[in-house]
Amino acid sequence: MSVSNTLSSPTRLGAIDIKNRVVMAPLTRMRAIEGDVPNPLAKTYYSQRAGAGLIISEATQISPLGKGYPATPGIYSAQQTQAWKEIVDAVHAKGGKIVAQLWHVGRISHSSLHAEQGLPVAPSAIAPAGKTFAADWQMHAFETPRAMTLEDIAQLKKDFETAAQNAKSAGFDGIEIHAANGYLLDQFLQDHSNHRTDAYGGSIENRIRLLSEVLESAAKVFPYDRIGVRLSPYGTFNDMADSDPIALFNAIIEKINPCGLAYLHMIEPRSTSAGGNDKVEENAPITASMFRKAFKGTFISAGGFDRALGEQAIAEGTADAVAYGRLYISNPDLAERLAINAPLTPYNRATFYGGAEAGYTDYPSM
């Protein structure tokens, strides 16, 4: 394997030069403090992992209504933005690159998390199956969301633009639009959750309209070559499904190809860990092989990768960079360990969500 096509080799994601192809995946840790401000410990947590070619921040809500879990950070207030700036500065001081993942959870929420705003919103008034976290950190049945009006959609696009501006003010190297894992933009994309009859529902063209318009809003702040998009074809997390995923996701790629994005970030459905488990679907489709050739830019693949699978993806060209999640929780110097095939520290699932230093900033480096 030549040095030009390994996890340790540098590459470029649009306008973002990265020193290796090991990406820290966005990891929800639920440790924000009052006001949805990033925890002061997050500066240590992220800077410890600055050896990654790129850090993608934990999913960060663009508005109070976009919140879906207790203690997740926002990027819509001045206090939040200042806290993120300190984190970004710490990452940059260690030679790292970091982008902000912007999300709105849509129906994957509970009204107790945003009492002033009321019920969660979604493309259609369809409650997902299952239960979700409420403000009391307990699991409650999903509520039936309120179907978004055209005025709501217009406000959503403004909220994405404002969040992008705050990310720029904080010094992030770019942003990632979260359109995966059954959250709001994914809810618009897939016909299991989108039963609208207006310009944002029905045909594939209509269902991908909102993602396209959100990208246009974000591009008022960041150039397209500093914007990434995350998608999850065939993902079932958060009660998602589509009647024709191949047609849908090929149409999405065709729509975004002319933008010249920094990257497309796709999640392999073989890994169903988005909900916090380690289950691997042995017979799941390999989306990198299905969709990578259709995308004209840089491709990041995530989901169930170890060192060998990551090196294979880079060598075979099915990915330009590989995102690692759980392994980055317990190995702050994961990129360095992968480079020399060093042993990896096992993670402690009990400390993934909530808490303080334990399982967050106390994992050792080599």
Image: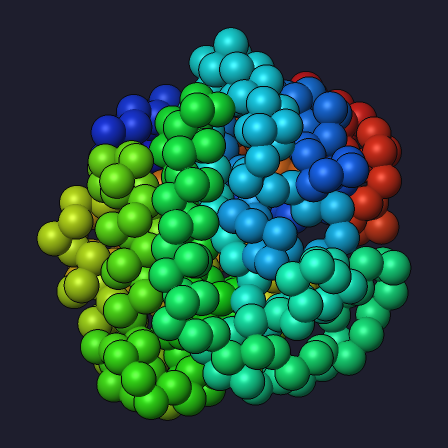
140 vs 49, left or right, is right
Query: Compared to 178, does 56 lie above or below?
Result: above
Q: Residue at x 80, y 26 (%)?
A: 362
Query: Compared to 94, does 167 lie above or below?
Result: below
249 vs 302, left or right, is left
Q: Residue at x 33, y 55 (%)?
A: 214
Residue situated in front as seen by the camera: 65 or 12 = 65
In x, y percent, where is residue 170? 48, 24
Q: Which residue is drawn at 49% across and 66% down?
A: 184
Location of residue 69 (image quadrant): bottom right
In the picture, which quadrant includes the C terminus? top right
Q: Residue furthest left?
A: 258
98 vs 354, left or right, is left
Total count of labels:
0
In x, y percent, where is residue 181? 52, 65
Location of residue 290 (image quadrant): bottom left
- Whether residue 29 is visible here, answered yes or no, is no
Query: Compared to 213, does 42 lie above or below?
Result: above
In x, y percent, where is residue 361? 76, 27
- Whether residue 88 is visible here, answered yes or no, is yes
Location of residue 227 (image quadrant): top left
In the picture, which quadrant includes the N terminus? top left
In x, y percent, where is residue 200? 31, 77
